[in-house]
Amino acid sequence: AAGVIQSPRHLIKEKRETATLKCYPIPRHDTVYWYQQGPGQDPQFLISFYEKMQSDKGSIPDRFSAQQFSDYHSELNMSSLELGDSALYFCASSLGGTPGYEQYFGPGTRLTVT
Amino acid sequence: AQSVAQPEDQVNVAEGNPLTVKCTYSVSGNPYLFWYVQYPNRGLQFLLKYITGDNLVKGSYGFEAEFNKSQTSFHLKKPSALVSDSALYFCAVRDGGGGSYIPTFGRGTSLIVHP
C-alpha cells in the first residue's frame, strides 16, 4: 500500500538559510499534519491542513510557513534557519477531519542546521 | 484541554514475557485513543485505536490495549514480547467532544525486550 512520502530525507543547511520540505500524503487522504521531533522528544505539532485550507496551528515559528496544494501535497517552508531548528520533521496524513481517524506518518526529513 | 501521560520513560521485559506500557489521559469529551510505535529514524506507525465499543482493542503485531474509563487509562499490552518489539511507543488522545482534532501525544515509552 502507498505510504506518506517525504522529501528530502536528509537536509543540511547553514544558519540563516532557507529550507523547503515536501510531503505527499496517502492517496485520498485530505488532511496533512506537520510535526517537529527533537532528540528523545515526542512529536510537536506545527500545523495542519484539511482540504487545502489551514485547519489547526500549533507551535510553528513565524519563520515557518506551509501550504497544501491542489494535488494535496504539502510543503513546509523554513526561513532564517537557526541551530535549534535541527530536528526530524514528520508529515502525517489522515482521511477526513474527524477525530476517529488515525494518522499515517511519513519517514521524516532530518534537518541539520550548522 | 486534553493531555496524555506515559509514566514510564522505559520498560524492560524479557523475551517471551508479557509486556505492559502504561498510558493515562484527560479529555473533556469522549476520548479517542491511539497507540503508535516508532523504530529508530523512522516515522510513527499506527498500532491500534479505541473509538467506541469493546474496551479491549486488538491491533497490529499481536498488541492489544484496554480502555478503562473509570481509571482514564489505555494501557498497551502483549502476551509474549519479542526482541523485535523493542522501540519507542507513543500514546495519543483526541477529544471527541469537539474543538481541535489535533491529537496530543505522550512523551513516549522506550520498550526494551531482552533476549
Image: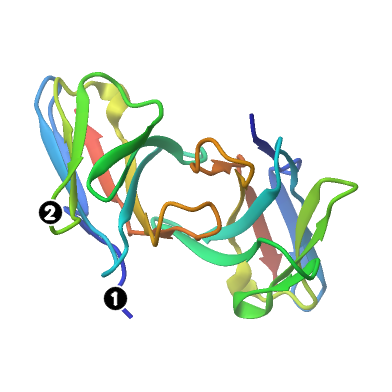
Which residue sits at x=42%, y=52%?
A97
What secondary structure is marked by label 1? loop
B10 and B33: which is toward the camera:
B33
The relative height of residue A110 versus residue A77 in the rendered view (above or below) is below
- Cα separation, mark 2 vs mark 1, equals 19 Å
Query: Is residue A45 toward the left or the right of residue B73 in the image?
Result: left
Q: Position of residue B71 (x, y in %)?
A: 88, 46
Mark 2 and mark 1, same subunit? yes
- Identify the mark at residue A70; answer none if there is no mark: 2
**Kind of residue indicated by mark 2:** Ser
The N terminus of chain A, quarter of image: bottom left
Q: Position of residue B107 (x, y in %)?
A: 60, 39
Give the label, 2 or 1, closer to the camera: 2
- Identify the mark at residue A2; answer none if there is no mark: 1
Query: Is residue B26 toward the left or the right of residue A56 in the image?
Result: right
Q: Position of residue B97 (x, y in %)?
A: 64, 42
Q: Are marks 2 and 1 in contact (CB under 8 Å)?
A: no
Residue lying farthest right? B70
Res A38 visible:
no
Q: Residue B16's image quarter? A: bottom right
Which residue sits at x=20%, y=56%?
A72
What secondary structure is marked by label 2? loop
The relative height of residue B95 versus residue B79 in the rendered view (above or below) is above
Q: In which chain is the residue bearing label 1? A: A
Q: Residue A2's image quarter? A: bottom left
B7 and B5: which is toward the camera:
B5
